[in-house]
Every structure is written in structure tokens, then in C-alpha cells.
Amino acid sequence: MIRKAIKSFNSIPRINYEIDGILSPDPLVSHMAKWKNYGWIVKEELVQNFPTVTLFHPDFCAQLLKQEGSLPIRPPPLPLVYYRESRGLGSGLGESNGMDWLNIRNKAQRILLKPMSVSSYLPAQNEVSLDFIQRLKTVRNSENIIPDMYKELKRWSLESMATVCFDQRLNLLSTEQINDCKSYYPEILLNNIEHIHKGISELIFSDWNEHIKNQTPLFRNTMALLDEQTEITMKLIESADKSGALLNHLSREMSPESLNTLIIDLLNASIETTANGVIFLLYLLSKNLLVQDRLRDEINAIVINQPLKQGHIDDMPYLRAVYKEATRLFPVSTFIVRVLQENGVIGDYEIPKNIPIFYSNMVAGHLNEFFFESDNFNPNRWLNSKKKPHPYAVLHFGHGPRMCIGKRFAVQETFLGLIQLVRNFKIEYIGSDIGLRMRLFNTPDREMSFQLTDVVRK
Ligand code: HEM
């Protein structure tokens, strides 16, 4: 057998930023430009001359993940590490590595990834989605338009996760609270999560050491937001009755400080990601009204009366197909990223240890070689059991021991929200075609208005 010669790390093509599209703020445009110009693997210096590698081929992603070991390493977001160390708080799930990470992960995933624990929150999260519909009916204008749907979805998403993280409702969907929100903790928390994401992503993608050295306004502001968040979540956890599976179990296994840090990580990782996933779905359903009608028919045939149960959702294959298809075209996560602990090989190239390696979640999903007529939004492709897609082509929630720990909650919440939205409204997007922007994950590049017209149920 002839073995291919392994090429050196230095021979991986290196990106030239002058090529058209590569510096686009839209991650899809920029990733496609990199792939078109350089192929399946590229090298670049994203921050401070430190080399990183980006993979576009799902086979390469599989090779990367085979080499990640049982304690996969993700480069930590340095501002969060700094914040937690400087305040003497324990490390969190998202930013720790090694045994520190495993200790937290083992405790948390016993609840967060256990189907029975997740579905124990289904009735409360369904109530939240029903209240969300009532709120939308009240706040839409005389033409049934919600001018900034993303803002509303974040409200719903935090209210829904509060049933898990704080065993209580936060009243964020009440229309009476709207004008009286300045000193109301949940409103402050909602606002705070959004600004923390902006702050951390700006700090990460600029010169972090300079920010610390000069204590820049962005640095100080982000640290102050993190302090505010720590204080509010601590109060909310203290006032929880700890009757739900998560707090009940973890408050006996973790110190109050570590529990607070975990809850903060869950909130920061969930509110905007889930809201983004739903807004992309609503956009695609607006552009594909036949799909929207078919989904509504499936929902109406199954959900005749409330309360909604797990069994109802299990009987909705088209809902799952619509969801998967939306994550292919509009993945919320731009990358998954790992650092190898030993020198490795990907494709034909040597990859030294300690270098961040990204797998782009944006490219393979948009290529005809992995998805027939890849530009078309066609949920049916996921119902065809004969032709399975490449298992690493779309990794919406990552993969392996370090995959998204909130995956089951994200799917449950999304399905509950979508079922109620599609059951109640004909959903139409008002505006021009969207692009993407990357904060720590993909978001729409503009404010999005939707017209929500009541549907009459037969
Ligand atoms: C549509 C919504 C969501 C998407 C697309 C998403 C995506 C991801 C991805 C891609 C990762 C990295 C996985 C990897 O490196 O292999 C991740 C990690 C994580 N996610 Fe999610 N997520 C979502 C919702 C949630 C929710 C609802 C929660 C909390 C309940 C959550 C909590 C976390 C945490 C804590 C991590 C870090 C896990 C670790 O490092 O062990 N996510 N998520």
C-alpha cells in the first residue's frame, strides 16, 4: 500500500486577507470565500499573530474529533477566565478544561442531558410559550406586526430557562411590566446577557492584553456587567424553592458560588442561541409558506387540546425535519473548536499541539456535494431514511464529550415555542433578505419584523 507523504504544518495554505469576501463581516460569505480560494484546510493568524487552522471538510472534522481524547480542550474565553480568577469565583463549564471541566460536566450533565429530567420541565416551559403567544397578541401593532422579533424571542427564552435555572417565573412576558423595568432584576438580567456577549466577543477579537494593561472602557464595562450578573443570579437562586431537578440535585452537590457560576454559564450559553435558532426558523418558514402550512397541519393533527406532552412532540417527524433543515442553512454556531494535546495529523498535514483548530459549521451544509440542491430549504431530505447526510457535515450542537450540554433543553424549548407560534399565527417576515453577523455565534445582520396573523383553527 502506498502511504501519502505527510506535509508540514507550514505548507498549509495561509490566508491572504486581500482576497474578495474573506474579510466580510458575514461569516457565511467569509467562510465560503476561504473555502473557494484555499480548499478544505487553511491557516491564519486571527488574533495577535497566533496561528489557527480552519477545516471545511466534514471528514477532517471527524479526524480532529477522533484525536480530541476524553478531556477535549477548547481555548477558553480569556475575559471570562480573568473575571472569575480576579473575583475568586470557581471556574465555569464553558471556560474550564481538564479535570476541573470534567468535575463540573459530570455533575451537570446528569440532569441536563437526561431525557426524563429535561421533560420534567416541559409543562412549565410550555406554559411560558403559551404566555408568549398572549404577549405577542398584545404587543403586535394594528397591522399585526412585531417590529423587533429577536427582542421578543430573547424575553421568551430567558423566561423559559428561568423555570430551569431558578425554579420560578420572572414575569418577563407580562405586558404590564414593560414601562416599569429600570429597577426590575429580570429586566436588568435580560439586558445584561446581551451586553456581556457583545463585550466578551469584542474583547476576544481585539488585543486582550492591551485591554487589561490599559483598563479600557470596554474592559471595565464588561467586568462591571459580569459583576452585576453574578449578583442578580445569586439572588434569584437564593429565592428559588429548589423543587426542580437541576437546582434540587446540584444545590446538594455544589457550593453556592460554583452553582451560581454554572447557572450563569447556562444562561449565557442559552438565551441568545435559542432565540437566534428560532428567528432563523421563522425566517425560513416565512420564505417557504408551503412548508409552514404542512408543519401547521402536522401540529394541528396532533395537538388537539392542551396540555402538550412529550409524546405529542415525539409524533412530529416533520417538525424535527424542519428544524434540522434550518440548522443546515442557518447554523447558530459558527465553529466548533478544539486544541490537540499531542501533535496530530489532519488530511495530509501535520498539526502541532496547542493550536486552536476550528471546524466551520457554515460551509459543508451549503455545498451540493453534501446536500442535493443545497440552496433549497427542503425538510423532506431529512425524512429520506435511505440517503443519510454526512454525520459531521452539520454539527449544530458540536460533538463528543464536550458537545452542547444544553442540547436537549434547546431542542425542547425551540419545539415548544415553534409549535405554539405556528399553531396560532401565519408567520410572514417583513423586510429584505438577511445576512449573518458573528458575535460568539451567528445572529441575523439586522432587526427583523414579522407579521403574525391569527389563524383560524378548524
Ligand atoms: C440553539 C441553541 C444552542 C446551540 C446552537 C448551542 C450550540 C453549542 C455548541 C456548538 C457548543 C460547543 C460544543 C462543542 O464544542 O462540541 C455548545 C456548548 C455549550 N452549550 Fe450550547 N447551544 C445551544 C443552547 C444551549 C442551551 C439551551 C444551554 C443551557 C441549557 C447551553 C449550554 C451550553 C454550555 C454550558 C456549553 C459548554 C459545554 C462544555 O464546554 O462542556 N447551550 N453549545
Image: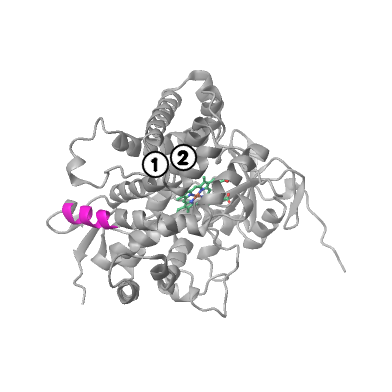
Left or right, 186 with respect to 325, comes to left
Which label is found at residue 382? none
Badge nearest the viewer, 1 or 2: 1
Tell me the SS state at disc 1.
Answer: loop
Residue placed farthest to the right in the image? 1
Q: Is residue 440 in sight in this rendering?
A: no
Mark 1 vs ligand 1: CB below 8 Å: no
Give the quadrant of the C terminus: bottom left
| Residue visible at 21% across and 56% down in the picture | 134
Asked if the residues shown at circle 1 and circle 2 are in contact, with their CB atoms under 8 angstroms apart, the answer is yes
Total of numbered circles in the picture?
2
Gap between marks 1 and 2, in whole Å? 9 Å
**Residue 80 point in image, percent of width and height:** 52, 32
Q: How crowded is the residue under tag 2: few (<14 C-alpha within 10 Å), some, or many (20+)?
A: many
The amino acid type of the residue labelled 2 equals Ile
Q: Nearer the viewer, residue 366 or 74?
A: 74
As displayed, is residue 201 above or below residue 394? above
| Residue visible at 53% across and 32% down in the picture | 255
Q: Which residues are magenta?
A: 130-138
Mark 2 vs ligand 1: CB below 8 Å: no
Q: Nearer the viewer, residue 297 or 428?
A: 297
Q: Nearer the viewer, residue 9 or 266?
A: 266
Q: Which residue is mark 1?
A: 166
Does the magenta run of residues contain 135?
Answer: yes
Q: Main secondary structure of the magenta part?
A: helix
Q: Which residue is mark 2?
A: 263
Tell me the SS state at disc 2.
Answer: helix
Q: Quadrant of residue 96?
A: top right
Residue placed farthest to the top in the image? 214
Q: How crowded is the residue under tag 1: few (<14 C-alpha within 10 Å), some, or many (20+)?
A: many
